[in-house]
């Protein structure tokens, strides 16, 4: 009995030591590479504004359509429940107005709030940990220069054991490493700037990198694509068949800065938000740096790779106004729905009539047999504001049944991607509920 007790004590001690060691904080302040669009540190508010946009703080901390910027309340529906973003305005009672510089830096780079409670990794501190202290404090200076908004944080909707914040310490021990960005001296300054923009500020991996059973990033498959909150974030590695390796630099730059690359696709859903709130504001030099970095990401086809047929026979056999080349079994409900609601904008040949954003041929969405993003766009529509231009597609979720949405999605995949869609009414119902 005494030996058993000693073994238990020993295991507790070893576990405690391992817990502490694996949760160590990197004390380094860090150094950021040159970000052309960010003013120098002598103007921290202006620098912080640019960095806050590059980090896409708005998308997570401002409810779409709200007049309360950075007051939180955005819902993140995850497999284990719903998490709501927090108020990060300078309000002392409900925001972060009472937080010191150290409090803010610790939260952003280590995922620990002022009160010592752990944040959930829906907040991407796993990426922000690479930020320099100076850049974090510049973002704080910008946030504190904005109007204070008094709004209580909404309680998360998590069941046991996910509602136990202290347990995040064990998650961090297994899947988080506190570390600052370190420039790769074997790479160009432009590449290093792009790496900082993509990994530290833009946190691209949080959406585009597959996750394991515990929601940790599978870094060995970095940026090879993942599905999150009902949308598919595509493979953005240099893989020429399934990623963006075959895209030209001009196409990548256009997509990142405008949300559209002709013959490649238009952004919608979370990617549309990232471009609308963040990427469109990058200076051309910073966009070019981001492109340089992405071009060098090792090719990885990821799970469920998408092969794009940019010359789908049914679409090429069609004119602007009339279909052609569809198989006999496609003359059904989906085709009728497309004719009634979609053809006037997208056209039968997929070129898009009123705007190039409506073009469909060559896009990954219509080449995905699962129809993940096609279904979401049909259900929820798409809205993107670039500069003073609004790109809009209405939602059809309330007008169409699950059976109709599935039929329409499968027809679009067949006609513009030359593939057999696998969207079912049950799957549409599931995506509708997300």
Image: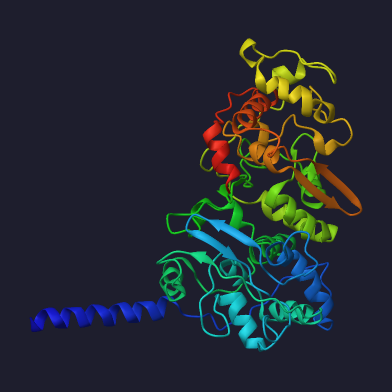
Determine which quarter of the picture holds residue 194. bottom right
Query: Which image quadrant is residue 337 in?
Result: top right
Q: 371 or 16, which lies in front?
A: 371
* Residue at (55% x, 76% y) in the render: 110
Q: Nearer the viewer, residue 260 or 399?
A: 399
Which residue: 79% across, 61% down? 286
Residue 307 to residue 204: above or below: above
Residue 157 image point, x, y percent: 52, 64
User: Is residue 368 in sight in this rendering?
Assistant: no
Give the quarter of the image for residue 345.
top right
Task: Point out the residue furthest to the top here.
Answer: 328
Q: Along the line of sight, which residue is nearer the eye, 256 or 230?
A: 230
- Count of numbered circles in the view: 0
Residue 62, horizontal then vertical, whole percent: 73, 65
30 to the left or right of 218 = right
Q: Is residue 220 visible?
A: yes
Q: Nearer the viewer, residue 407 or 190?
A: 407
What is the quadrant of the N terminus in the image?
Answer: bottom left
- Relative image position of residue 327 (x, y in whole percent): 65, 12
Give the residue drawn at x 82%, y 28%: 351
Side (left or right) of 338 relative to 4: right
Most distant residue in the left direction: 1
For residue 301, above or below residue 154: above
Q: Position of residue 101 (x, y in %)?
A: 67, 87
Snapshot colouring = rainbow
Residue furthest right as drawn = 388
Q: Is residue 55 left or right of residue 428?
A: right
């Amino acid at each position: 009995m005494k030996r058993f007790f000693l073994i238990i004590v020993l295991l507790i001690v070893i576990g405690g030591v391992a817990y502490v060691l694996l949760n160590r904080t990197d004390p380094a302040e860090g150094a950021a590479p040159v970000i052309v669009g960010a003013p120098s540190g002598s103007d921290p508010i202006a620098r912080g504004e640019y960095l806050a946009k590059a980090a896409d703080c708005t998308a997570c901390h401002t409810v779409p359509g709200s007049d309360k910027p950075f007051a939180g309340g955005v819902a993140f529906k995850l497999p284990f429940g719903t998490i709501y973003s927090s108020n990060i305005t300078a309000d002392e009672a409900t925001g972060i107005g009472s937080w010191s510089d150290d409090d803010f830096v610790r939260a952003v780079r280590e995922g620990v709030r002022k009160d010592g409670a752990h944040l959930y990794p829906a907040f991407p501190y796993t990426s922000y940990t690479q930020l320099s202290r100076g850049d974090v404090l510049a973002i704080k200076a910008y946030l504190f220069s904005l109007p204070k908004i008094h709004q209580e944080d909404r309680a998360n909707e998590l069941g046991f054991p996910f509602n136990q914040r202290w347990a995040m310490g064990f998650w961090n021990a297994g899947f988080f490493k506190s570390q600052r960005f370190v420039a790769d001296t074997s790479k160009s300054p432009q590449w290093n700037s792009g790496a900082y923009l993509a990994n530290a500020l833009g946190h691209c991996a949080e959406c585009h990198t597959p996750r394991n059973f515990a929601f940790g990033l599978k870094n060995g498959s970095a940026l090879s694509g993942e599905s999150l909150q009902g949308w598919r974030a595509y493979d953005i590695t240099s893989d020429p068949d399934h990623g963006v390796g075959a895209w030209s630099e001009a196409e990548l730059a256009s997509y990142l800065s405008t949300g559209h690359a002709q013959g490649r696709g238009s952004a919608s859903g979370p990617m549309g938000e990232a471009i609308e709130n963040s990427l469109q504001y990058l200076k051309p030099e910073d966009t070019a740096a981001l492109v340089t970095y992405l071009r060098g990401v090792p090719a990885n086809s990821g799970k469920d790779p998408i092969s794009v047929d940019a010359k789908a026979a049914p679409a090429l056999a069609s004119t602007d106004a009339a279909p052609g080349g569809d198989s006999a079994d496609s003359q059904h409900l989906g085709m009728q729905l497309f004719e009634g609601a979609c053809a006037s904008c997208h056209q039968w040949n997929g070129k898009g009539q009123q705007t190039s954003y409506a073009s469909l041929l060559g896009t990954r969405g219509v080449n995905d047999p699962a129809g993940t993003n096609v279904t979401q766009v049909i259900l929820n529509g798409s809205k993107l504001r670039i500069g003073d231009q609004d790109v809009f597609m209405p939602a059809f979720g309330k007008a169409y049944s699950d059976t109709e949405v599935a039929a329409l999605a499968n027809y679009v995949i067949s006609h513009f991607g030359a593939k057999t869609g696998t969207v079912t009414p049950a799957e549409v119902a599931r995506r509708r509920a997300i």
